[in-house]
Amino acid sequence: MGSAKGDFMLSVGKKEVVAAALPFQEHWLPLTNLDLLLPALDVGLFFCYKKPTMSFGSMVSVLKKALAQALLSYYAFAGEVVTNALGEPELLCNNRGVDFIEAYADIELENLNLHNPEESIEGKFVPEKKHGVISIQATELKCGGIMVACSFDHRMADAYSTNMFLVSWAEIARSKPGSVAPSFRRSLLNPRRPGRFDPSLDEMYVPIPSLPPPEEFHEPTDHLISRIYYVTADKLNELQSLASSDGHKRTKLESFSAFLWKMVATVAAKDGDKISKMGIVVDGRSRLGEGDQDKATLMGSHFGNVLSIPYGSQTVGELVEKPVSWVAKQVHDFLKPAADEEHFLGLIDWVEAHRPEPAMTRVYCVGKDDGPALVVSSGQRFPVSKVDFGWGSPTFGSYHFPWGGLCGYVMPMPSPAGDGDWVVYMLLLKGQLELIEKEAANVFRPVTFDYLTKVSST
């Protein structure tokens, strides 16, 4: 793929704030109970484009003009996060605007080591969000290509919401009306009176003040690092066959997650009695709209977080010794409770019962006596092929989500080629990734320029 250098120079040029094209009345937008389950955490994503016929200046002009128009509908991204009297975050929709950065990197796309985003992406192309809800950076590459990236506050939006925004922004840039108008109707996620929830939610989520003191958690002997791989459609089909047994066909996500859980457990095989946890992010939009067409339509365009993270716990020894089909059944079984409307209504009521104490999913809590933990979030709705601002679809795109702690995070996304392959962003402990690259190199293949060339020719 050429020399993958991480020491290239990035020159930051013009910085400005892009506000909505027309003023709107300042107002407060409360967060829903499901938003309140998210910590103060910024999420990054980026798109790579080959050299277009337009100049960089012309492309930036298109991006800014379309952004100002998109913010009329997605005005939450133009606001500011503030703290209310209860100490909870709220959104002040004041058209503060979006920080927009222009930059130049003296490296060609073919020499960019996308497999190692810590070297090539972090702190360079994905901007640090210092103000507001979202920050955007457009970077001209030495080859004439362009990188468009952003960083957004996860408390205000999940990946689904941000994907809607990205597609609308790109459509407006191509002089088309945005295909999805976001809904900010908070009443759809109001708690019930009286509230009720299944006691199992006390095992899935925990108020943060109830957590053990820091000294009872791990003394890190390893650290999380990011890598990006691709998995071919053929390998995904093989994993699905391995994971399916006794007439039970598992989904590709269940099969992939089961295989990955086994691999991660293998690193800790000597600690066979320790408990390993895996969580899978579930989007509740379709669940909350079941049986009510009007509500289903509104939930389908809801801007905010509509997520739950059910998880399973198994001993490291069982995960290592049992076949993939057994592990896939455990994955399938722990996902069941989050498969209906009542789970999400109960979760909303659970948060209400514990407010104003902040809460989080227990899978993130890795104690000193725990085995490995990780969360898988399906990025199959990542609209990489639709983020065309007028100079073609991206050659490559990925989320970039480095967080602290010791719980890993994995997001499989569709390949830009649309051929059934997956692009997989992985944030795991260094030792886990080393074993995966050694033992499963035929499944997880590093993203290289050769892969980008294949995508471009598809």
Image (cartoon, rainbow, N blue to C red):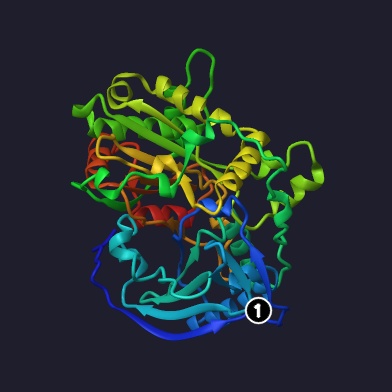
Give percent across and percent down for residue 405.
32, 51
Judged left or right of residue 294, residue 236 is left
Residue 353 at x, y = what percent?
Answer: 59, 44
Question: Up-down: is 371 above or below 180?
Answer: above
Q: Which image quadrant is residue 396 in?
A: bottom left
Report the residue at 60% width, 51% height from top. 33
To which residue does mark 1 refer? Answer: 20
| SS assignment at label 1 | loop
- Is residue 171 among what the camera can see? no
Q: Position of residue 80 (x, y in %)?
A: 56, 73
Q: Nearer the viewer, residue 165 or 446?
A: 165
- Name the residue at 61% across, 33% down: 339
In-front residue for pair 452/159: 159
The residue at 67%/39% (across/down) is 287
Whether residue 437 is visible, yes or no, is: yes
Please indicate whether residue 413 sits to the left or right of residue 33 in the image. left
Q: Which quarter of the image is occupied by the N terminus? A: bottom left
Kind of residue sitting beneath label 1: Ala
Q: How many marks?
A: 1
Residue 91 versus residue 255 in the image, above or below: below
Mark 1 neighbour class, 10 Å CA radius: few under 14, some 14 to 19, many 20 or more: many
Q: Position of residue 99 (x, y in %)?
A: 50, 78
Where on the picture, by quarter, is residue 276?
Answer: top left
User: From what the image shows, is residue 139 above or below residue 387?
Assistant: below
